[in-house]
């Protein structure tokens, strides 16, 4: 789908991190972004305290931005629940890099 | 005349709809029993309803241990996706294992024509299959179904937990039998549930709240003498522990103490040392009797409280904590019947603004009214009772 092709695809892992950080800031909202330290090794559940629907929202944003180059849902589906609970931002960055 | 047996976990939100449905069936001249491990259910049953108590010989160490799980859900603080792991591993699987023998015993002695299992008591579906009794399913937390689509890996994991127990109970196969493929009653409307393709056996009957007399005392005098006419209910349900409640209600007290509203709070009055003057704090409230008199509700997005609120056309502030509440809250926000806050992040100022917003921006009330009418059209108790009656005579038309 052409509409899903990103106009500013990140070229390295720093850029990928910056894009994902923006997604998380959008999800948690303007009011809170200064209260939460978003780092590469932040975990979605324990550190960022995203609840399940917020993780779904994050996943939607990743799919929309990085488009058809990666099967993000498929990748998540192969995880067991413990892996999903422990999932960190860096895991997502590594996956996106690996799909390049 | 037929005989029906509900199988329920010891969780208020899962029991309440069956009380309305059971009362409906009793009024139609049927016999109705409730299979439960909770003796406390006896006093809640409608007249004529029979408690089929699961209790075991106290010398059986394994079964004794099993009963310890019954209140595990109230003792632990859990949040987000982690709470789903806790729910299955520490509550549902042990609870189902504990209940199974008792369910089989009652199916053999009470001999119901139809079993109605709560979707979280999957052991009852296994027991019904083994005993050759047709079963329908009561879905009191429909967001669990929605998760199949939105978080497929969580759904897969849940199914694995259920199937593993089914196999231990002697039912082979890789598919979960938790939801009946003949009749699965979902206590919401399509409009509130959202888009999803489902088998024809899923019937959206709306919330069922009829035939539930107020069993709790309430200081109506104080309520009618309240200083501010505008009144909201603040409740985070029956399953969260002291620490969560203290944190939550402290923020609510700070947020609303100077607002021109009366807040009816469902809490142990000793939870906070001092409550604001515009707060009425009661351990229990007659929620269904109060709702028609209120202007809005602040809650944890438990499915029953949300549906009961929307059934009265009231807007909400939802602050989900665990389990399926994140989903229910998301639906409230999507249909624009309320404002959603994050439990871990919200400050007093957010709840103050959110309450102000739902009370003064009429669009929330209008959206709530649209869901209210979808609920009224769904058929409710009478329709659901007729579907169950049909199952007893072998005819199901959803």
Image (spheres, coloured by chain):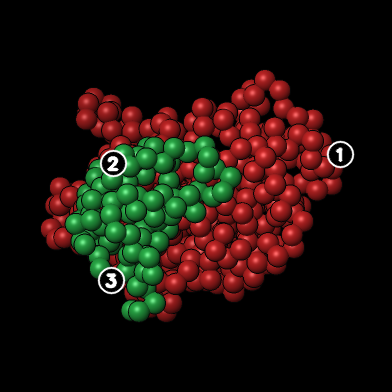
Chain colours: A green, B red
To the question of a shared chain for discs 1 and 2, the answer is: no
* Mark 1 neighbour class, 10 Å CA radius: few under 14, some 14 to 19, many 20 or more: some
> Residue B16, relative to residue A48: is it above or below?
below
- The location of residue B293, given as percent across then percent down, is 76, 52
Residue A51 visible in image: yes
Q: Residue at x 43, y 54 (%)?
A: A23
Q: Which residue is mark 3?
A: A68
Front residue (pair B361, B218): B361
To the question of a shared chain for discs 2 and 3, the answer is: yes
Q: CA distance from mark 1 to mark 3?
A: 59 Å
* Mark 3 neighbour class, 10 Å CA radius: few under 14, some 14 to 19, many 20 or more: some
Q: Which residue is mark 1?
A: B227
Q: Quadrant of residue B153?
A: bottom left
CB under 8 Å between discs 1 and 2: no
Disc 3 sits on a residue from what chain?
Answer: A
Q: Which residue is mark 2?
A: A86
To the question of a shared chain for discs 1 and 3, the answer is: no
The quarter of the rendered structure image containing the N terminus of chain B is bottom left
Q: Residue at x 63, y 50 (%)?
A: B317
Q: Nearer the viewer, mark 1 or mark 2?
A: 2
Q: CA distance from mark 2 to mark 3?
A: 26 Å
The quarter of the rendered structure image containing the C terminus of chain B is bottom left
Q: Residue at x 28, y 62 (%)?
A: A73
Say what secondary structure mark 3 lies in: helix
Q: CA distance from mark 1 to mark 2?
A: 49 Å
Q: Residue at x 76, y 34 (%)?
A: B257
Disc 2 sits on a residue from what chain?
Answer: A
- The location of residue B396, given as percent across then percent down, is 39, 76
Say what secondary structure mark 2 lies in: helix
Point out the tag, 2 or 3, that comes first from the N-terminus: 3
Disc 1 sits on a residue from what chain?
Answer: B
């Amino acid at each position: 789908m052409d509409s899903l092709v990103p106009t500013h695809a990140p070229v390295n892992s720093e850029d990928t991190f910056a894009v994902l950080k923006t997604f998380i800031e959008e999800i948690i909202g303007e009011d809170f972004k200064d209260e939460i330290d978003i780092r590469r090794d932040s975990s979605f559940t324990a550190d960022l305290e995203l609840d399940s629907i917020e993780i779904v929202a994050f996943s939607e944003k990743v799919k929309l931005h990085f488009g058809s180059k990666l099967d993000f849902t498929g990748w998540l589906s192969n995880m067991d629940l413990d892996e999903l609970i422990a999932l960190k931002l860096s895991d997502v960055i590594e996956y996106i890099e690996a799909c390049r | 005349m037929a005989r029906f047996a509900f199988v329920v976990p010891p969780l208020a939100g899962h029991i309440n709809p069956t009380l309305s449905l059971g009362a409906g069936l009793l009024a139609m001249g049927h016999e109705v029993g409730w299979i439960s491990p909770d003796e406390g259910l006896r006093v809640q049953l409608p007249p004529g309803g029979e408690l089929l108590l699961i209790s075991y010989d106290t010398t059986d160490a394994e079964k004794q241990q099993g009963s310890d799980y019954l209140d595990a859900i109230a003792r632990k603080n859990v949040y987000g996706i982690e709470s789903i792991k806790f729910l299955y591993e520490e509550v549902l699987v042990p609870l189902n294992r504990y209940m199974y023998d008792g369910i089989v015993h009652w199916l053999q002695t009470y001999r119901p024509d139809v079993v109605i299992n709560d979707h979280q008591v999957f052991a009852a579906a296994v027991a019904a299959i083994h005993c050759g009794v047709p079963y329908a399913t009561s879905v009191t937390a429909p967001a669990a179904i929605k998760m199949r689509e939105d978080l497929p890996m969580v759904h897969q994991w849940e199914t694995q937990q259920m199937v593993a127990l089914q196999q231990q109970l002697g039912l082979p196969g890789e598919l979960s039998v938790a939801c009946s493929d003949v009749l699965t009653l979902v206590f919401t409307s399509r409009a509130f549930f959202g888009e999803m393709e489902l088998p024809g056996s899923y019937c959206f009957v709306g919330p069922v709240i009829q035939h539930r007399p107020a069993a709790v005392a309430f200081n109506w005098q104080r309520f009618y003498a309240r200083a501010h006419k505008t009144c909201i209910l603040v409740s985070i349900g029956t399953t969260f522990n002291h620490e969560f409640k203290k944190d939550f209600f402290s923020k609510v007290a700070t947020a609303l103490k100077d607002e021109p509203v009366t807040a009816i709070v469902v809490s142990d009055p000793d939870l906070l040392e001092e409550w604001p003057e515009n707060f009425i704090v009661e351990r229990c409230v007659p929620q269904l009797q109060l709702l028609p008199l209120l202007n809005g509700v602040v809650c944890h997005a438990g499915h029953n409280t949300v549906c009961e609120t929307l059934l009265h056309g009231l807007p909400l502030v939802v602050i989900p904590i665990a389990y399926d509440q994140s989903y229910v809250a998301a639906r409230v926000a999507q249909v624009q019947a309320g404002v959603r806050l994050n439990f871990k992040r919200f400050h007093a100022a957010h709840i103050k603004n959110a309450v102000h917003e739902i009370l003064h921006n009429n669009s929330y009330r209008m959206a709530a009214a649209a869901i209210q009418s979808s609920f009224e059209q769904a058929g409710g108790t009478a329709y659901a009772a007729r579907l169950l009656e049909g199952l007893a005579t072998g005819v199901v038309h959803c």
